[in-house]
Amino acid sequence: MPPKTDTASWPWSLAWPLPAGQRLATLGAWVATGLILLVAPFERVDSPIALPGQTITNAEAATLVALAIWIGSSLVGRRLPAWRSPLAWPALALVAGVAVAAAAAPAEQANAFRTVGRIAAGLFVCLLAADAGRWRDGVPALMRIAVAAGGFVGVVALLEVLDVPIVVGWLAHFRESAHVVGGQLRATSTLQYPTITSMYLEVVFAMALGVLVLEIDRGRARAAGFVFVAAAIIAEGVVLTLTRAGLVTVALSLAIVAAGLIARRGLDRAARAVVALAFVVSILAGGTLGLRSSWLRFTTDGQEGWYRATFDAPVSLRLATGVMTRVPLTVRNDGRATWRTEADPSFRLSHHWLDAKGAQVVVFDGLRSAFPQDVPPGGQTTVDAWVQAPPVPGRYLIAWDIVLEKRLWFGTETPLTTLTAVEVSGDAVGTLPPPLPGMPLAEVRLGRLTLWGIALRMIAARPLAGFGPDNFRLLHGEFAGIDRADARVHTNNMYLELLVGAGLVGGLPLVWLLWRIVSAMGRAWPRVGRDALPVFLGLAAAVAAVLAHGLLDSFLTFTPTYLVIWTSFGLAAAWAASTGEPRADRV
């Protein structure tokens, strides 16, 4: 007859070995957490699962499978999941708060409830990770899984920036387009946006530091060498995203782990390895950021100022149907990036054909015309622009634009204002392609400080329940007084984002949850022994990276980031609570 276990106590305080059923349940939680860490950075955008009123990505489907494994193994093992953990009540309060805010949203309720689902999934992942953390020897293994996945993401980021064709083609499954600033690619790797890639890698980098120290302490030189290289690659991946906050949090993680080691153990071999890694990372960052465009990226807010041009073009033209002709015009570079004509990718003068009212796009991709020489910021040049008249007579507009081949159009960054009226006459020589509904011109994008000011005004307008989770991006234009606000823009602050979306009913539970995690780690710090120190410092650095970067960006609605963030929070809380308790040697 198996020994009785006090299930009223916190799961991580249970003595091992546990009864067979409970070992199965805990192993199921561990497997489920490992699955999430493996899948998190590989969310595809090209094959969602369609459901009524909702689509589910492969990463979200894998998360549901992981949660099912957790619940199923708990049922088979006849052991309730770790619902009594210190994170459980704050997590449930947060889910309830954002659900109330979504129900009370004055508009865009469907979007708000979809976001509630993501937040709820993230919080269940947090509880799952805390449950998996009851197997103490399983936590370093989970961190190794995260480091392996992050190392792969870092390698892909490097190959992406090197423009390896097979890699760039493969990445089309994970993102809609490449992202550039100043003509320089911002790495996304297998994630959708550079800042999302950076946040994911920042958390994994912190875990890698803990694993590195652990391998050194155990005398596993070869494994430590692999982790050292992986950590350097992950850090370089952060650098290649050109995310300023990412560099700060990488430095913060290095400082936390190095300071913690030195405070407890002096400048021992592990501490020296962390310092050496900091030196390597600084060399890699310096080599990557030596380019002028990279430096400017890190000293400016936003990228719309990079891509500006002034055109001195004819007011009107008369052309015959289908005829190709040259139109001389003068172009001035009002942005921050040099227009290089021989580089790959290169800058080219181009245009779009619109109907007479500018309401529909007749031809989006106009002919390309090369600049006679590179055009630096503030410089100007005269170009013979090639245009080919539409095959059907009528009145049209040419919207002049500049394209960075295979990367972006200036018109998607700053509004196009230079138009040439064209009267096309003659017999039809073909047919027009189906018109596009409208020119995908640039929405108005606002700086971070401006966004914060708008967020504060929205919080003041609805302080209790907010405007619905994730609705800032859809509703902030009214408070900013602009018609074409960019619907992709968030508050650029995790805390303001939640307060705008869920007000105090969501903000206070988040503070409660974060306080539980931070205070648990603070109380555990004096009791952390030598064996537990590496994992403790790695997870503490991961939590610090999220809290710090959250001041400048918001990540809780993006699947890859909320999965790794909530997993790190759950593991950190479990490890802190288990410090000084009997350790679990084996499942």
Image (cartoon, rainbow, N blue to C red):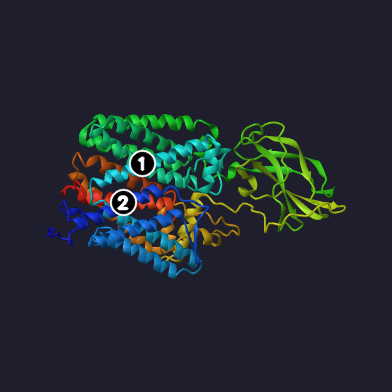
Q: In this view, does 420 lie to the left or right of 262?
A: right
Tell me which residue sits at (38%, 29%) in the image: 280
Amino acid type of disc 1?
Val
**Residue 269, position as x, y percentages in the image:** 25, 29
Labels 2 and 1 touching (C-beta < 8 A): no
Q: Residue furthest right?
A: 426
Residue wearing tag 2 = 31
Q: In this view, does 104 lie above or below 475?
A: below
Residue wearing tag 1 = 147
Q: In this view, does 402 lie to the left or right of 159?
A: right
User: Badge 1: how crowded within 10 Å, few (<14), some, or many (20+)?
Assistant: many
Name the secondary structure under disc 1: helix
Amino acid type of disc 2?
Val
Report which quarter residue 273 is drawn in: top left
Q: Is residue 348 above or below residue 390?
A: above
Where the N terminus falls, by quadrant?
bottom left
User: Badge 2: how crowded within 10 Å, few (<14), some, or many (20+)?
Assistant: some
**Residue 291, position as x, y percentages in the image:** 53, 31
Q: In this view, does 151 lie to the left or right of 433?
A: left
Report the front residue among 126 and 413. Answer: 126
Cα separation, mark 2 vs mark 1, equals 16 Å
**Residue 550, position as x, y percentages in the image:** 40, 50
Tell me which residue sits at (65%, 50%) in the image: 415
Tell me which residue sits at (43%, 39%) in the image: 154
Q: In this view, does 257 lie above or below 96?
A: above
Name the secondary structure under disc 2: helix
Q: Can residue 558 be seen in this view?
A: no
Indicate which disc, 2 or 1, sits on the residue closer to the N terminus: 2
Report which quarter residue 101 is drawn in: bottom left
**Residue 500, position as x, y percentages in the image:** 44, 61
